[in-house]
């Protein structure tokens, strides 16, 4: 992930840590129902982090859309 929270962004740091932890969890699980649940939790955590960054101006909708092809 290229965008990281600023030092003063405590909420962003918590959300970023959640994403990192869940990414590691997904990578370490085999092909099982637990992995699918972890992937769903990771997707939710990533969405929350993106919304946080959008709401505080760390990223813009235009920058997100410009990366899509």
Image (tube, grey):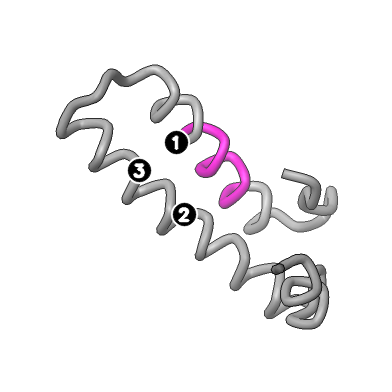
In this figure, which residue is indicated by the disc labeled 1?
22
Q: Residue at x 62, y 46 (%)?
A: 16
Tell me the distance, in whole angstroms, between the alpha carbons under discs 3 and 2.
Answer: 10 Å
Residue 45, labelled with which disc? 2
Q: Residue at x 28, y 18 (%)?
A: 30
Query: Is disc 1 placed on a helix, strand or loop?
Result: helix
Q: Decide: marks 1, 2 in contact (CB < 8 A)?
A: yes
Q: Is residue 15 magenta?
A: yes
Left/right placement of residue 59 relative to residue 11 reads: right
For the residue carrying disc 3, how many other residues have a C-alpha within 10 Å: few (<14), some (14-19), or many (20+)?
some
Q: Is residue 45 above or below residue 47?
A: above
Image quadrant where residue 17 sits: top right
Residue 8, labelled with which disc? none
Left/right placement of residue 33 relative to residue 59 reads: left
Of mark 1 and mark 2, the one earlier in the sequence is: 1
Find residue 25 and report its horizontal and vertical position in percent.
40, 26
14 vs 53, nearest the viewer: 53
Find residue 58 and report its horizontal and vertical position in percent.
81, 69
Q: Is residue 4 above or below residue 50?
A: above
48 vs 37, nearest the viewer: 37
Range of residues picked out in magenta:
14-22
Q: Nearer the viewer, mark 3 or mark 2?
A: 3
In this figure, which residue is indicated by the disc labeled 3?
39
Query: Is disc 2 placed on a helix, strand or loop?
Result: helix
Of mark 3 and mark 1, the one earlier in the sequence is: 1
């Amino acid at each position: 992930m290229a965008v990281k929270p600023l030092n003063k962004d405590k909420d962003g740091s918590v959300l970023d840590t959640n994403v990192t932890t869940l990414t590691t969890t997904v990578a370490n699980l085999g092909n099982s129902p637990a992995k699918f649940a972890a992937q769903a939790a990771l997707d939710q955590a990533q969405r929350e982090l993106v919304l946080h960054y959008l709401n505080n101006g760390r990223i813009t909708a235009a920058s997100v859309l410009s990366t899509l092809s």
